[in-house]
Amino acid sequence: MSATSHQQHRRRRTYALVATAAGLATAGALAAALPATASPAPSGKGGHTSRYQDVQLLSFNDLHGNLEPPSGSSGRVTELQADGTTKTIDAGGVEYLATHLRQAREGNAYSVTAAGGDMVGASPLISGLFHDEPTVEALNKLKLDVTSVGNHEFDEGSKELARLQNGGCHPTDGCYSDKKFKGADFPYLAANVLSEKSGKPILKPYWVWKKKDVKIGFIGVTLEGTPGVVSAEGVKGLKFKDEVETINKYAKELQRQGVKSIVALIHEGGFPASTSYNYDCDSGSAGSGVSGPIVDIAKNITPAVDALVTGHTHNAYACTIPDPSGKPRTVTSASSFGRLYTDTTLTYDRRTGDIARTSVKSANHVVTRDVAKAPDMTALISKWNTLAAPIGNRPIGYISADIVKDGTESPLGDLIADAQLAYGKELDPETDLALMNPGGIRAPLTYAAQGAEGDGVVTYAEGFTVQPFSNTVNLQDLTGAQLVQVLKEQVSGTNAASPKILQISAGLTYTLDLTKSGADRVVTDSIKLNGAPIDPAATYRVAMNNFLAGGGDGFTTLGQGTNPLVGTDDLTVLQKYLTANSTPTSPIAPPAADRITVVQ
């Protein structure tokens, strides 16, 4: 598909909120009764095999190497209570995830575990420092059967992804122990990621799970837009094809092989109407449902596919969206960072070899921290923490309170932008401002001590968790007109439906009017630098990471900057700023996050 036809294809897609009973099948539509033999009874009298066999599908997505319990809001989920109120629950950590999955499998002879991508990448120090080998080891111990690739699997390029699959020591950092890294015991599926040279998928497009006479095919894809959210180097030599066309193609291939039960693992997702993980997505009441790219994808994937495990948006939902024939089909996502897992019951019909869709049940469950820790995971974490400790425990700064990453403009976003502006001025005193993409800020800075460092101490490991990408901080020149256009691209073009609000350094101010639509939401006359209106004809020196400098996240105008200068990595920049501007007796306070005036 050419770039032009791709854009036209995307424009034809409708991402409207699926909110009504007509748009989404209700839970009742899935409740049609099957024969009593639909329970997991492998045989009856005289060795008779039951026609129906329940298969347990356990799934999760977007783990991002979070082996230890994530901190702050990244380690909590919201639960809807019977009286309509909500409460937050601490969640996540592979010691607990392992226990929950193992308990869920008990009594289920037919159980398969699958994931929806982004198992690695943007990982905390314990995994990221070692190129995510610790996470692959943990997933092997979790008995993960199969996963799709996500966009973050390409952060270090396709060769590194192949190493995670096949094993071997890192080409530059070597081996971390006397044992050679053996790679993943599970297949990574990349049906829509092709080599530009061969035109073939770089990894397996699908995989078939078999247990006695039951077989289920899994097709794995990542979002077609991966090149827009990964550095150019990470996707060099690769082509990313349309999700729907790819899944439909391989569903036919599986059917030709006699595999009629099919699950799609899709690293693309949606936006539920509620942030509560247990919200009834199919209630049919006003505001229910899910919106976003996955809706249109789900509506166009062949009815041959029986269930969709999704991800990427880090949201939690267990919904039904009708397939092209109008039949309800389950679509799930288990938030992120190992805080939830999804338990789906697929009833396999031995007579047809297909899934009896009317009996599919799906629900998300919290990975609570009130269960026993899995000893093998505790040992794994201890092993890698011992290797990481000399680097990770080093203090790099001090804060007086939590510095959060939430909100249109966040205190942590301001802090990072200010750090990049200060570094930019070191490289070139003429640097005027800095811009930071919100997706590059992976965790908050929490005041409470994570270990023995003491409250308010920011360690290198905590800084790494915030900015794990090893992006460089670069400088480039933009005209005032280009700078205005960049700010408008936050809320227009590919970012119109889901705005990406850049975090901005001190001195840059403007109004974001959410009562308007498209690019008009950024009020042009309000954009000022140090109190002065932006001069369209003037040249401004702007600091940003190399991801943005390459036009990432839909900021095509940033890819047109001139006079580039490449600096050091972003974590070093943050570390320098924290060290220079804080002491134990004079810690940094959370910035006010008052640079963008939001009108709603």
Image (cartoon, rainbow, N blue to C red):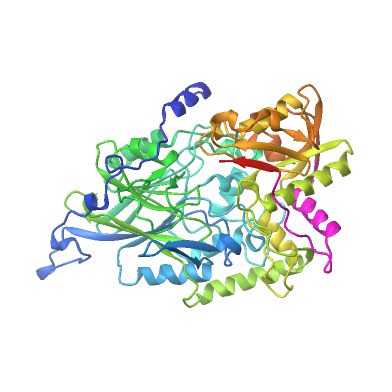
> From the viewer's perspective, is 94 left or right of 123?
left
Identity of the residue furthest to the left in this view: 46
Observer-nearest residue: 208 or 18? 18
Q: Residue at x 79, y 50 (%)?
A: 573
Is residue 577 one of those drawn in magenta? yes
Q: Quadrant of the C terminus?
A: top right
Residue 537 showing in the rendered view:
yes
Observer-nearest residue: 362 or 88? 88
Q: Is residue 329 above or below residue 377?
A: above
Q: Residue at x 83, y 46 (%)?
A: 423
> From the viewer's perspective, is 167 left or right of 1?
right
Observer-nearest residue: 586 or 305? 586
> From the viewer's perspective, is 137 left or right of 31?
right
> From the viewer's perspective, is 74 left or right of 568?
left
Q: What is the quadrant of residue 463 in the picture?
A: bottom right
Residue 493 showing in the rendered view:
no
The location of residue 292, given as percent across then percent down, is 44, 40
Q: Residue at x 35, y 59 (%)?
A: 363
The location of residue 142, given as percent across then percent down, is 47, 65
- Write down the region rendered in magenta: 567-594
The location of residue 450, given as percent across then percent down, is 67, 70
